Amino acid sequence: MTPVTGEPSPTGEPSAGWIEGREHVLPVRIYYEDTDFTGVVYHGNYLRYFERGRSDFLRLAGLRHSDLLDQESPSAFTVVRMELDFKAPARIDDALQVRTTYDAVKGPRLFIGQRIVRGQTLIAQAAVLAACIGLDGRPKKPPPGMTTLLAPYFAATDAS
């Protein structure tokens, strides 16, 4: 696997970050709009950063959400559970990284680990359980092509 750099694409699309080993890295800058009146990131915004990390990881692995919807049997994802721990505050102008791993797929479930860091400081971490669903909202196994694209990134204990 060749790591994808954070350089601008020839098509002018914004950077989707890059992959280091089995971990996706997405840079995030904190703007005024992300903060509360004290200059600290509002807690709900971390969910947005984590969502961007999960989506951009899939995009770099070769899977777009729109592709899942365009299949003969359309699929989408829903977050079923998220355990979130806040460790340190992020503040206006901080340069953060959202680091995401897709750890395993079991049936319709995807197990995802995420953390947000500022340098070596852990800001927040999340354990995410997502499920692949059909347009009827019922759980279904992810399309085989998706599992194949993600397989190189699964944790070693889950990839066998």
Image (spheres, helix red, strand yellow):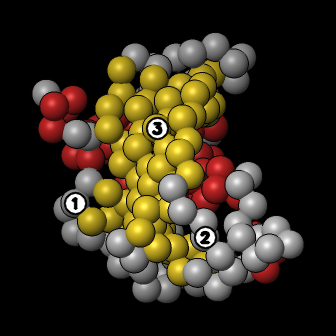
Residue nearest the observer in this picture, 26 or 147? 26
Q: Is residue 121 above or below residue 55?
A: below
Q: Is residue 11 above or below residue 79?
A: below
Q: Nearer the observer, disc 2 or disc 3?
A: 2
Q: Please state which amino acid type lies under the numbered disc 3.
A: Ala
Q: Where on the picture, by quarter, is residue 144?
A: top left
Q: CA distance from mark 1 to mark 3?
A: 19 Å
Q: Where on the picture, by quarter, is residue 110?
A: top left
Q: Residue sitting at 32 percent across and 57 percent down?
A: 23
Q: Residue sitting at 63 percent across and 31 percent down?
A: 78
Residue nearest the observer in this picture, 137 or 72? 137
Quarter of the image with the C terminus in it: top left
- Give the labeled residue for mark 3: 127
Label 2 neighbour load within 10 Å: few <14, some 14-19, many 20+: many
The location of residue 139, given as percent across then percent down, is 57, 15
The location of residue 21, given as percent across then percent down, is 22, 60
Q: Please state which amino acid type lies under the numbered disc 2.
A: Ala
